[in-house]
Image (cartoon, rainbow, N blue to C red):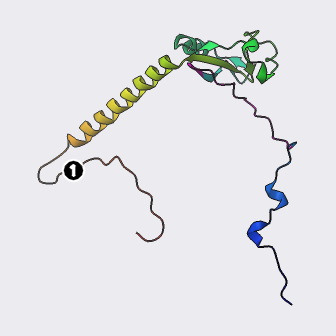
Amino acid sequence: MTEERTPRYGEQRDSDVRPSDSWIPASVIPDPEPQDGWVFRWVRTSILGQTDATHTSRMFREGWEPVKAEDHPELMLTSDVGSKYEGNIEVGGLLLCKAPEGKMQSRSEHFQKMADNQMQSVDNNYLRENDPRMPLLEPERSTRTTFGRS
């Protein structure tokens, strides 16, 4: 009278198997194929229909250079109408640019050093008010997350 059943863990659900022709929505700003030694970034060229030449030229001076559309055919984009950057990849006022990885690493280190100096300055300003009768606590730079009772 006992019926032999396949254990549930042996069954495979239809929802676990994705069809090969499944559709995925396209990204508004696609990612280019990675290239060794290069970092990619979308640089703002206009905002609210007004060109932002100041920002764009600053980014170019920092080392970002526009990416040619023929270098990345996988993006298959049409450039913005009336774009000043013909032959490049521009979407909605954003221009795809690239820069050498080493240069961007040193840029990140520069800004990290600036942030560290600012934090040290804040600490020095805070601890300057220290009085031996009522010492201030040392700044704490760590965070903790707990769940439940603790």
At a point 37% along the width and 27% down the height, the residue shown is 114
Percent position of residue 37, x then y: 55, 18
72 relative to 133, above or below: above
Residue 129 location (% of width, % of height)? 20, 43
Give, as a single range, the part of the protein colored magenta.
22-39
Residue pictured at 35% horizontal, 32% vertical: 116
Q: Residues within 10 Å of mark 1 (few under 14, many from 20)?
A: few
Identify which residue, 106 or 118, lies in the foreground.
Answer: 106
Q: Quadrant of residue 106?
A: top left
Between 84 and 5, which is closer to the camera in this rendering?
Answer: 5
Q: Secondary structure at mark 1?
A: loop
The residue to which callout 1 is attached is 136
Q: Classify residue 112 as left or right of residue 75.
A: left
Residue 61 magenta-drawn?
no
Q: x%, y% of residue 85?
A: 72, 10
Horizontal and vertical percent position of residue 109:
41, 25
Q: Is residue 46 left or right of residue 38?
A: right
Give the residue type at disc 1.
Answer: Leu
Instruction: Name the chief secondary structure element in magenta.
Output: loop
Task: Give me the residue at 81% from left, 39% from top.
Answer: 25
**In this rendering, would 72 be left or right of 148?**
right
Residue 45 versus residue 90: which sits nearer the camera?
90
Answer with the quarter of the image where residue 59 lies. top right
Return the residue nearer the eye: 85 or 38: 38
Give me the residue at 16% from left, 54% from top: 134
